[in-house]
């Protein structure tokens, strides 16, 4: 895993390059890393700021032998591995906002985007895209993102070696993936819950079906968030934008 690495200069998005490799039968664990992305993608069709040399912009080709509905577990596993490796490397207090944003004091430093191709309900391949804002400075961000975005450098006050970030993530990911293969999702779920900053405080979730207000209490096996609504009903939310209540 991570032993075939394509190191590229400027690309549109490492997701597109990795998908191309996957379609050409690239092996499980093939990694695409770019210095710069000209049209980096975030979740929900958003753009991802990816300036040259300042971050880790990479995509992994995975070929898990799993049914398609396990894909969200891989996203959460990736968030846990990334959070653990960055905490160890930097000593910063980094938490996971559901489902897979990494935050420092409420500001985002990393995002994960999983795109998959399936055939007859089984995953053919998964492209796990990881963006880590390592050495970005404040003027690398558009003004409107500054209240919500930071970088390891801004948070720690020191430049951080991107190679060390990649190496420690890959080691952590490989270990956690082996645990997942041997013991299933439960250990990952527990680690996710321990690192989460989204649980046990009131939240507003904007879902495709409408707004839900309640207190998230845990992670569902399939990757959803278990929420207790104000009338006491528990429900599981699978896709939503999460925010804090206004009052
Ligand atoms: C998000 O939080 O919205 C997900 C951001 C994912 C960004 C990474 S950077 C490498 C890969 N290539 C992309 O275009 N996006 C992902």
Image: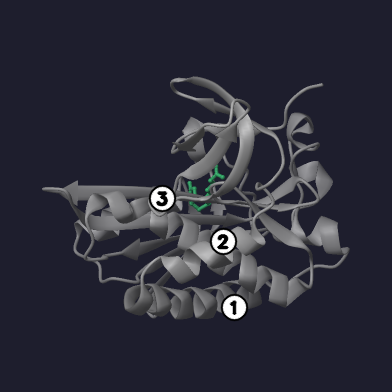
Q: Does the numbered disc 2 mark a residue whose Cβ is under 8 Å from ligand 1?
A: no
The residue under the point 23% across, 61% down is: 66
Separation of residues labelled 3 and 2 (CA atoms): 17 Å
Is residue 222 shown left or right of residue 153? left
Which label was assigned to residue 233?
none
Badge 3 or badge 1: first in the primary sequence: 3
Badge 3 or badge 2: first in the primary sequence: 3
In which quadrant is the N terminus drawn?
bottom left
The residue under the point 70% across, 61% down is: 134
Separation of residues labelled 2 and 1 (CA atoms): 18 Å
Q: Residue furthest right?
A: 157
Q: 81 or 147, which lies in front? A: 81
Q: 2 or 93, which lies in front? A: 93
Residue bearing the label numbered 2: 192
- Determine contact: label 2, label 1, CB under 8 Å: no
Which label was assigned to residue 168?
1
Marks 3, 2: nearer the viewer: 2
Q: Callout 1: helix, strand or loop?
A: helix
Badge 2 or badge 1: first in the primary sequence: 1
Residue bearing the label numbered 3: 114
Residue 136 visible in the picture: yes
- Residue 136 lies, in percent from the top left, at 75, 53
- Determine contact: label 3, label 1, CB under 8 Å: no
């Amino acid at each position: 895993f991570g032993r075939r690495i394509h190191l590229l200069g400027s690309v549109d998005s490492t997701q597109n390059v990795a998908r191309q490799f996957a379609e050409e039968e690239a092996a499980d664990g093939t990694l695409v890393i770019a210095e710069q992305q000209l049209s980096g993608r975030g979740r929900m069709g958003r753009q991802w700021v990816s300036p040259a040399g300042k971050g880790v912009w990479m995509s992994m080709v995975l070929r898990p032998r799993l049914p398609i509905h396990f894909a969200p577990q891989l996203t959460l596993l990736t968030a846990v591995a990334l959070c653990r490796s960055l905490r160890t490397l930097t000593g910063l207090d980094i938490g996971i906002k559901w489902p897979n944003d990494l935050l420092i004091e409420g500001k985002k430093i990393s995002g994960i985007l999983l795109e998959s191709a399936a055939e007859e309900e089984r995953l053919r391949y998964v492209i796990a895209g990881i963006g880590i804002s390592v050495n970005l400075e404040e003027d690398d961000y558009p003004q409107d993102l500054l209240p919500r975005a930071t970088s390891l450098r801004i948070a720690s006050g020191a430049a951080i070696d991107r190679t060390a970030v990649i190496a420690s993530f890959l080691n952590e990911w490989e270990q956690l993936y082996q645990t997942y293969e041997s013991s299933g999702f439960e250990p990952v779920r527990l680690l996710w819950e321990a690192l989460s900053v989204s649980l046990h405080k009131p939240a507003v979730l904007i879902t495709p079906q409408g707004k839900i207000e309640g207190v998230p209490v845990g992670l569902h096996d399939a990757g959803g968030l278990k929420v207790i609504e104000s009338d006491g009903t528990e429900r599981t939310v699978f896709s939503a934008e999460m925010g804090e209540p206004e009052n």
